[in-house]
Image: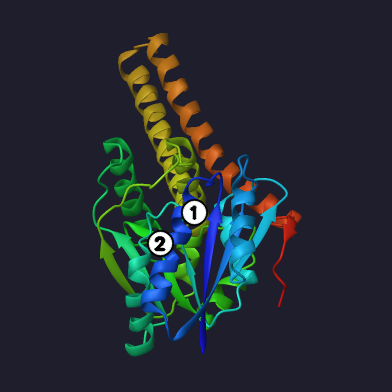
Amino acid sequence: MEKISIIVPCYNEEESLPLFYQEMEKVRENDFHDVEMEYIFVDDGSKDSTLKEIKKLKEHDSKVKYISFSRNFGKESAMLAGLESSSGDYVTLMDADLQDPPSLLRKMYDIIKNEDYDCVGTRRVTRKGEPPIRSFFARIFYKLINKMSDVEMVDGARDYRLMTRQMVDAIISMREYNRYSKGIFSFVGFKTKWLEYENIQRVAGETKWSFWKLFKYAIEGITAFSTVPLILSSIIGLLFCLISFLLIVIIIIKTLMYGDPTSGWPSLVCIIFLVSGVQLFSLGIIGQYLSKTYLEVKRRQKYIVKETNVNKK
């Protein structure tokens, strides 16, 4: 009998977990008589009773496994820990808040089995319920990164996807410290089919993704899969050098021909501020790439497990 590993990153999800488990068990009992399942809940350093709720589930269900981090390492690390600990022939990533509909899982499994796909991913076709400003910047981000990067990032794509063991092993083999999974999923390739659905609100709790966190995550994605910002900073620097050279020539000619001395210190101050701003902006871009290189070179652990009942393969 084939096996599906269900990986659920959790951060302060004590209210959502029982609801998620109940819904998944309904799907398993109704749609998966021919498939074995395991749940891998990854407690990402939660500050509430998330781990206690997971252990309650474990007491009544031997399919439930858990990994608890020593602190909050972020969703990327939680997903990686789950992937590394999974043993299924197929692996799926799901959020505990039920924004990833469990009802789609059987359809995803059937597509992989019958239509020669390595992965079935999901994408939202609407962002109903999100703040308009957040939706606007999300669309802008996907347009920018797809123009900058060699790998395609699908607008509205979720982490919720069902993957074959071969694809999962390829993802695990990507050992970078600064992980951006949406980019890694695309980078490793493999044949993927997308299922579309309308946005679903959380069943309980509050979102952990503030605008600032999403902004930092977007910067992570751009720097991880594109060097275009470095090229742009070089082009801007060259452009300002050419403009400065032309202005110097104009001023010299004007002075020699008309005897007009240079004047206007306010405009000079504005130009200095403008050029200084461009320099600082370019240095900031370079600094982002240097910081990522620095973190990669240190080769720190991506996460530290405090407690688990998963036997490593």
Whether 41 is drawn above or below 108: the answer is above
Query: Which one is nearer the viewer's eye here, 157 or 220?
Result: 157
Whether 99 is drawn above or below 7: the answer is above
Residue type pointed to by label 2: Glu
User: Which picture quadrant has residue 67?
Assistant: bottom right
User: Which picture quadrant has residue 61?
Assistant: bottom right
Could you tell whether 26 is left or right of 53 in the image? left
Relative image position of residue 40 (x, y in whole percent): 58, 65
In the structure shown, which secondary structural element does the residue marked by tag 1 occupy?
helix
Query: Which one is nearer the viewer's eye here, 50 or 226?
Result: 50
Q: Residue at x 45, y 41 (%)?
A: 205
Relative image position of residue 123 (x, y in whole percent): 32, 61
Relative image position of residue 39 (x, y in whole percent): 55, 68
Q: Which mark is residue 18?
A: 1
Q: Which mark is residue 23?
A: 2
Q: Residue at x 33, y 89 (%)?
A: 114
Relative image position of residue 43 (x, y in whole percent): 62, 53
Q: What's the CA distance linking mark 2 and mark 1?
A: 9 Å
Q: Residue at x 50, y 27 (%)?
A: 276
Which quarter of the rendered picture does the C terminus lie within? bottom right
Q: Residues within 10 Å of mark 2 (few under 14, many from 20)?
A: some
Q: Residues within 10 Å of mark 1 (few under 14, many from 20)?
A: some
Could you tell whether 147 is left or right of 284 in the image? left
Residue type pointed to by label 1: Pro
